[in-house]
Image (spheres, rainbow, N blue to C red):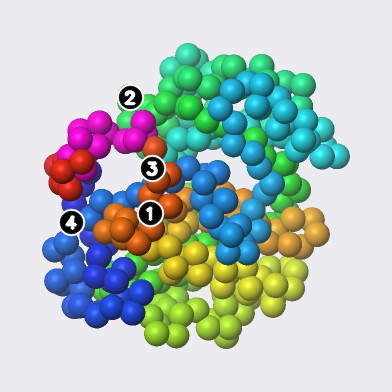
Amino acid sequence: AQMLRQASVLAGAALRGGPRVAPELSQLTQVRHLNVHEYQGAELMAKYGVRVPPGIACHTPDEVAAAAAKLSGASGEVVVKSQVLAGGRGLGTFTSGLVGGVHIVPVAEARGLSEKMLGQTLVTKQTGAGGKPVNALLVAEKLNLVNEMYFAILLDRQSAGPMIIACSEGGTSIEDLAETHPEKIIKMKIDLDKGLTKKQALELASGLKVSGSLDDAAEQLTALYEVFSKTDCTMLEVNPLAETGTHLLYAADAKLNFDDNAEYRQKELFALRDHAQEDPREVAAGKFDLNYI
């Protein structure tokens, strides 16, 4: 069941120039959010100039084999990633017994692996015991990632506006890191009228300890903010945001949530909704513009 959401619909409206409302009032609003698959989020981010690993969404073993041959590169390997709307895929387990929802394999093994993943149910720490069906796989180029960071933009209840949370250490649980080393977490509130300024973007790039060009990194962070502000995001989380051996910044894995109240304005985006990943009771309630509690 969908829980009472704390993020404010009216804060989302403020991102688009609407009226700002006291946080204590905005917290009374119940909101449902659209989630999209990793490959869909990557396609969206790429439209705004965000670098993402080359990848192809596949729904059959034959498609996986063709995509693997195309994306193998010099390593001769590809990354095969289950597409479910839940975190913890890498440490998940299929009900069939196969361990791991994300695998790095030689091209020749990609097709056989996909046969064990497609149509199966993956259970992770976020899916619940019932798991989620894997109806699509993302076959991606294996990048040489040498420096992993964490970057997220979300709606802050206190300010009813966007806040950036970042850390120079990514690819792991940000919650655990925040508990053990809170001094490593960067928090930055963004002015709704000004957006993410160049000065702020450069400050963030420096705080993330990028090894490449600060200006290039700042441009990538600005592009991520553009995705957030122009597509009615309620959360954009990139973990890891990573540098390659050539010192270029990539959004290696991202999760995006969107405000359901913006459906009338984001029709193309909301057409991506995968009802197979949602609670059927919530889907039924949504047809009547209701939330299942």
Looking at the figure, which quarter contains the C terminus? top left
Q: Which residue is mark 3?
A: 273
The percent coordinates of residue 33 (x first, y second) are: 31, 51
Say which quarter of the image contains residue 7: bottom left
Task: Specify whether residue 190 is in view.
Answer: yes
User: Viewer-nearest of labels 3 and 4?
Assistant: 3
Q: Which numbered disc, 1 or 4, marks the residue that appears first in the sequence?
A: 4
What is the secondary structure assignment of the residue under circle 4? loop
Q: Which residue is mark 4?
A: 30
Q: Amino acid at mark 3?
A: Arg
Q: Which residue is mark 2?
A: 130
Q: Nearer the viewer, mark 1 or mark 4?
A: 1
Look at discs 2 and 3 and give the one toward the viewer.
Answer: 3
Is residue 281 inside the magenta stretch? yes
Residue 153 figure quarter: bottom left
* Mark whose residue sits in front, 4 or 2: 4
Residue 245 drawn above or below residue 226: above
Residue 115 lies, in percent from the top left, at 59, 17
Q: Position of residue 197 (x, y in %)?
A: 53, 83
- Nearer the N terminus, badge 4 or badge 2? 4
| Mark 3 or mark 1: whose residue is earlier in sequence | 1
Which residues fall within the magenta stretch? Answer: 275-286
Q: Are marks 4 and 2 in contact (CB under 8 Å)?
A: no
Q: Please name the residue shown 50% across and 79% down the image.
A: 196
Hey, what amino acid is under mark 1? Lys
Mark 2: secondary structure: loop
Give the CA distance from mark 1 to mark 4.
Answer: 21 Å
User: Which is more toward the observer, 253 or 180?
Assistant: 253
Which of the two labelled residues, at mark 2 and mark 3, occupies the earlier sequence position?
2
> What's under tag 2, amino acid-wise?
Gly
> Tag on residue 267?
1
| Dot 2 and dot 3 residues touching (CB under 8 Å) | no
